[in-house]
Image (tube, rainbow, N blue to C red):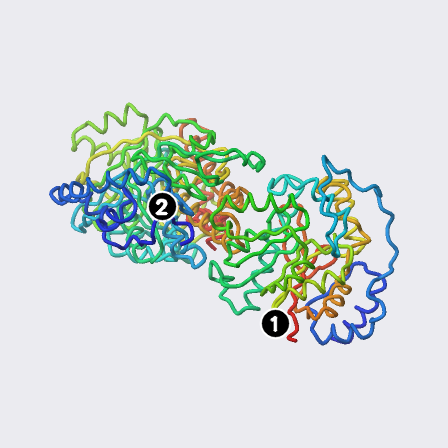
Amino acid sequence: MASKLLLSRLRTLAKPTHHRFINPTPIFTLKYQTLVHSRPYSDAPQPPPIDSKPPSINGDNPLKNKKISSSLNQTELAKFSAIAETWWDAEGPFKPLHVMNPTRLAFIRSTLCRHFGKDPNCAKPFEGLKFVDVGCGGGILSEPLARMGATVTGIDAVEKNIKIAQLHADLDPGTSSIEYLCTTAEKLVEDQRKFDAVLALEVIEHVADHAEFCKSLSALTVSNGATVISTINRSMRAYATAIVVAEYILNWLPRGTHQWSSFLTPEELVLILQRASISVQEMAGFVYNPLIGKWSLFDDIGVNFIVYGTKDSE
Amino acid sequence: MYLSRARKVTWRWEGRVVLGRITPKVYAWRFDWRTFCSDTSGKLLGSNSNQATTELLDKQDSTNDVPQYDVAIVGGGMVGMALACSLASMPLTKHLNVAIIDSNPALMSRDCIKKEDPPDPRVSTVTPATISFFGGMGAWQYVQLHRHAFFDRMQVWDYTGLGYTRYSARDVDKEVLGCVVENKVLQRSLLSCMEDSDSQKRIYPSRLSSMTLNLSSSLSGSDNISSQPRTSLAKLNLSSGNSLYAKLVVGADGSKSHVRELAGIRTTGWKYPQNAIICTVEHTEDNWCAWQRFLRSGPIALLPMGGKYSNIVWTMDPKEAADRKLMNEADFLKAVNEALDNGHGPRPQSDVTSGGGLFSWLKADKASSANEPFEVPPKITKLASDRMVFPLSLMHANTYVSKRVVLIGDAAHTVHPLAGQGVNMGFGDACSLSRVIAEGVSVGSDIGEVSLLKRYESERKAANIAMMAVLDGFQKAYSIDFGPLNLLRAAAFHGVNYISPLKRNIISYASGEQRVPLFS
C-alpha cells in the first residue's frame, strides 16, 4: 500500500493536478526527497495569467523600506499595503480568511495540543509557549492564538499591516500582549529569535524564494518545535477556484491577489521543508461548502491545504 | 482572570468582605440572599452597616477602574441563569468571567421552599430535552430535591366531542413525556448548581440603564485623544451608577427586553385577544396525566403538580379572564370543572370497540396508546393559590444577534403558553449559545464577534420559528368555531391518535428532541 502510494505520488509530481495525499509519513518523505532531489519545482504547464498588470497602489508608496533583504516579493507587498485597512472588516477583501479562520485554527489547536502534550479541553492550552505568526497581516491569526494562551509575536513586512494589527489588538485586553514587529523572518533569524511554534499561513504563495523562506522558518523554530504552513495547491482546480472564481467571479479577493505560478504543490512543500530540517507530520485540506458557507477540514488537498511539521532535533 | 481588573475574588467569599474591599455595589452571592431574604431584621442590618463604605468606594470607582467581563447576562431569570450555569459547567467556558445583572431581589432569595406548602401557580412543563440539559450541567439533582411531577400520559381533546388523542411516553419508548416544576424550584436549582462550580461570577442587583457599543470597525479614527479608554467592548451603565465592560452582552431580560431595545433590534409579532389565568388547584384523586382541552375561547390545561395538586392554565378573552379572576371560589371551581369536562360540549366517544366509522381506515398502524379509552380528568375540589392573569402575545426578534449582543429566551421570542413550550425554547437557546461560545473559545475567537454568534442564531431561529408556527397555528385553528373546520380538527385528532409514526414525531417534537440536533 505504502509503495503504491509512493509511486502515485511520484507520477503526480510532474503534473500537479487533482490528487489525494494523506498524512505522509516521515519515511516516505525521506525517500521522496532522495528520488527527486534534482527537481524541487515542477515545470508543469501554466495557464496564462488573466491579468498580468500588477495591481495599482493607492496613495504614497508603502515600500519606503527598500532595504528589506529577504525572500519577499515586492509587488506582493504593495498589493497588501493597498488593502491593509480592511483587514478587520469581516465582509471586506479578507472575508475568505475570516471565514476560513476557525477551520484552520481547529487544525492548529488539535495538532499543536498533541505536539506539546497539552489538554485540548483547556481554554488556554498554549499558555507558556512562544509562537511566531509570520506574515501576520492585520492579526487575524495572532489574536486567536493569543486568546488560546500563546505568547505571540506577529511579524509582517508591510508597516501598515503592523499598525492595523497593533491598533486592533489593543482593543481587547486578551490580545494586547501580542508583540507586533514590522520585519521579516530573515531579520528575526539574524536577531537569533527562537519560537516553540512557527506559523506561516497563506503566506508562502506570496513569497519570492520558497526555499529560503522555509529555511528561515526552520531557523526560527526551536529543536523539536512545530511549524505550520498553509497555502494553495498549484493544481488546475486551485487555479479555477482561487483565481478565476474567487478573484474574478465572486470578487472575494482583489484581482491579482494570487499568482498561480508561485503556488506550491504539497509534494514540493514537503520537499522544501524536509531540506529545511522540518518533517511533515500531518496534512489536511480545506474544502469550502458554498451551500452552508463554511470551510471544513478534509483529506482533499486539491486546493487549499495546511501542513504541520516538526523541526528535527539538531 | 485576565479580564478582571477588579482583584480576584470568587463569589464564594463572604459578601461583606467583598463589598468592603473590592468593587462597590458588586454583591457576592451570600450577601445577596442575606439582604433579600424574608427576614427583615437581617436585611436592615446587612444593608445599613455597609452603606458608608459603599459610598466612599463609589468615588474611587468613578475614576477609571471599570471592571471587564467576558459575558454580561442581563436578566437573571431561569434562562439567563441556565446560560450562566451551562457556561460554568463546560471545561472550555468555565474560566469565563460572568456578570449577571438583575434588580429582582426575589431572584437570589434563599428562603427555603417548603414541600408542604401548596405549589406556586407559576410552573413550567419541562421537556425531556430540558431535563437532559439540566442533568448535563448538574442542576437536575437539585430539582429532584424539591417538588416536581413527572407525567407519562397526556390527553388532548376539544369541545366538539368529535375526537381526542392520548399520548403516552410508551409510544416513544420513553419513561416520561415531561415534568411539571415550579419556576422558583428551577430558579433555585440553577442557583445551587452555580454555587457548586468554582467559576467567577458576580451579581449586580441593578438595572441596565444604557449600553454603549463601539460599532465602527474603522481603526483610522483612533488618533483622537479621548478620556475614554479605547476599546471595542460593550459598556454597560447600570441604574446603581456602576459601569462595566463586556465582550458579550446577553439579553435574557424577557419579552420587553431592554437590551433588545438598546441594540436597536426590531421585532415582529401580535397580541392574541386572550389572557391566561393560572392557579393551583386540588382534587381528590392523584393525577399523573397532563390534560388539555380546546374550548371555543381558548385551551385549558390541567398539569399534574404531584399528588392531589394540579396547575391550571386557562386561556380566554381578557374580559372573561378578569371576571373569572374576581368571582368567588365556588363559582370559579364550577367554571373550571365545566371547562374540563361537562361544559362547552359533549365528551368524545371512546371508539375502541367500534370497527367501522369515519376514521377506521387510519387504524392500520396503531400506536399502543390508540387503544386507550377517553378518560375524564379529575374533578377539581379546591383552589390552592391566588388566580393570576397574564396577557398573551407572539413576538419574534428579527435578529437574535448583533455586534457584542445576543438575545435568548423571551427576549428573542415569546409564544402562546400552549403546550408549555416557551421556557423550553429559552433553555434550548441557552444550551445552544453556551456551546457556540465554547466553540469560539476553542479556536480563540472573540466571543462577541457576529460571525460566531450567527451560528447560534442559525441553529435556534429555525427551531424557534417552527415551534412558534405550530403553536400559533393551534391557536388560530381553535379560535374559529365552524362546522367543517371542526370536523377537520377532529380528523386531525383521529389521525394523530392512530398513525403511530406521526404521533411519535409529535411527541418527540414536543419533547424538544426533533430538529434540535444538539440535544440528540
Asked whether, in this view, residue A75 is left or right of residue B101, the answer is right
Q: Amino acid at mark 2?
A: Ala
Counting other residues with Cα less than 10 Å from the Cα at mark 1, is it few (<14), some (14-19), or many (20 or more)? some
Q: Quadrant of the N terminus of chain B?
A: bottom left
Residue A260 seen anywhere in this rendered image of the structure: yes
> For the view shown, which residue lies furthest in the left direction?
B41
Counting other residues with Cα less than 10 Å from the Cα at mark 2, is it few (<14), some (14-19), or many (20 or more)? many
Identify the residue position indicated by label 2 in the image. B99
- Subunit under mark 2: B
In the rendered structure, find residue A103 and report the number of the disc placed on it: none
Residue A1 seen anywhere in this rendered image of the structure: no
Image quadrant of residue B328? top left
Residue at x-position 16% and y-position 43%: B49
Asked whether, in this view, residue B432 is left or right of residue A47, the answer is left
- Subunit under mark 1: A
Identify the residue position indicated by label 1 in the image. A224
Q: Determine the CA span between mark 2 and mark 1.
A: 42 Å
How far from the left and from the top, in percent, is residue A48? Answer: 87, 48
**What SS does tag 2 mark?**
strand
Have a look at marks 2 and 1 and say if they share a chain: no
